[in-house]
Image (cartoon, helix red, strand yellow):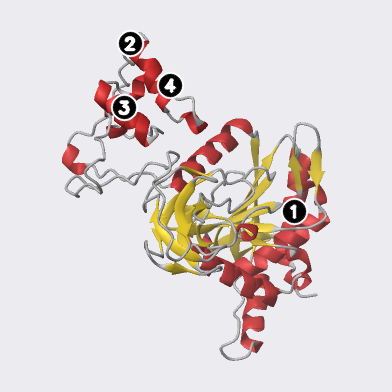
Amino acid sequence: MATDILMPALSPTMTEGKLARWLKAEGDTVSAGDVIAEIETDKATMEVEAVDEGILGRILIQEGVEGIPVNTPIAVLVEDGEAVPEASSTQAPAAPKAEAAPAVSTGTPAKTPAEEKGERIFVSPLARRMARERGIALDALTGSGPNGRILKRDVEKGVTAPKTAPKAAPSATPVAASEETVRRVPNSTMRKVIARRLTESKTQVPHFYVSVDIELDALLELRSKLNATAQENSFKISVNDMMIKAVALALKKVPGVNVQFTDAETLHFENVDISMAVSVPDGLITPIIRNADRKFLRQISVEAKDLAKRARAGKLKPEEFQGGTFSISNMGMFGVREFAAIINPPQAGILAIASGEKRAVVRGSEIAVATVMTATLSVDHRAVDGALGAEWLNALRDIVQNPYTLVV
């Protein structure tokens, strides 16, 4: 019996995804557990495993299609020797083809003007053919099917219904002085989600910022000693590893910052799960070091390197980047003197870590030279007040400047 392979929900918050790549072709034998495709979400590219065995009879969604709703059929699995059923009317639109590419089948209708502009129109094959034969523009119809899909009855209604007024012309798009100097790159799914979430954060979350200068010389000396005593070819602790542990200990010391705000209540977390920002080709992702306050520096170092490596390869599991109670963003390796980060909702705080640099410092009546780093805390003012944010930053500074608490 033919079975639809559906677009999976790879995380509790996933509503749609992009079919990045098929790893099986039509006619291939598939066993339960085989990886058949790669799906790109707003966070990572993840593998899709088959749950049944059979023959991949028909691929319904081509590579490169974005915005595929969860539970949409993406392929059909049949038994050996079974005839492949006709394509379902719920089939999602195929991936856009290059201008010179040949059509997949001779019966495929031309795209409507709305589709040529990039607007997605969900329509059943029968309704599309009827609309073409009757000269009805699809963007003039209102779909009554799932996700606004245009069905046969919608086309039939459109025959007798008065024509709708033409859509208002879109506002003019700014054009550069010379089009030859512009390279237009479509936004990826990840970039679109990042844009939406950060806009929501800056417009809906009242940020305030507190900065402090932290001397790093004692921490750097401890790091050198720990790495010198490590076995050859063993782990090497980074400043970022030590900052993750320091941030976690500061959150245990001042737990009022380890919170999340909701309209009904403020959530106070016993666990300290640190989300660390990792740059990836299409944007950034925040894998999580869970219970960072209870882990040794060696554990944090090994785990952080593994998570960052798999994040850049798009191989993180949903549970490895979803959640977290507090975030850090470290741009010290780029020579940045100071910056402020945007809060990652629903968290209430994020620490921006800048570069350590030699600066003049005053100790008593003398001037000395020290390695100093500026750290900036961005906080949700609905959940954390200014004095509490300052208290937390001072706790962090004390831990970093007396770093042996990191190894006790």
Q: Gap in Å between the C-alphas at discs 1 and 4?
A: 59 Å
Q: Gap in Å between the C-alphas at discs 3 and 4?
A: 15 Å
Whether tag 2 and tag 3 are in contact, CB under 8 A, the answer is no
Q: Residue at x 76, y 73 (%)?
A: 404
Question: Residue 353's quadrant in the figure?
Answer: bottom right
Percent x, y of residue 57: 41, 58
**Which mark, residue 130?**
3
Q: Earlier in the sequence, mark 4 or mark 2?
A: 4
Q: Gap in Å between the C-alphas at discs 2 and 1?
A: 67 Å
From the viewer's perspective, is residue 141 above or below residue 33? above
The kind of secondary structure element at disc 4 is: loop
Say which of marks 2 and 3 sits in front: 3
Q: Amino acid at mark 1?
A: Asn
Q: Amino acid at mark 4?
A: Thr
Question: Label 1: how many residues lie within 10 Å, few (<14), some (14-19) or many (20+)?
Answer: some
Left or right: residue 215 compared with residue 169? right
Whether tag 4 and tag 2 are in contact, CB under 8 A, the answer is no
Q: Earlier in the sequence, mark 3 or mark 4?
A: 3
**Which mark, residue 379?**
none
Say which of marks 2 and 1 sits in front: 2
Question: Residue 20's quadrant in the figure?
Answer: bottom left
Question: Label 3: how many residues lie within 10 Å, few (<14), some (14-19) or many (20+)?
Answer: some
Residue wearing tag 1? 394
The kind of secondary structure element at disc 1 is: helix
**Which mark, residue 163?**
2
Q: Earlier in the sequence, mark 2 or mark 1?
A: 2
Res 173 visible: no
Q: Gap in Å between the C-alphas at discs 1 and 3?
A: 70 Å
Q: Earlier in the sequence, mark 1 or mark 4?
A: 4
Residue wearing tag 4? 142
From the viewer's perspective, is residue 227 above or below residue 148? below
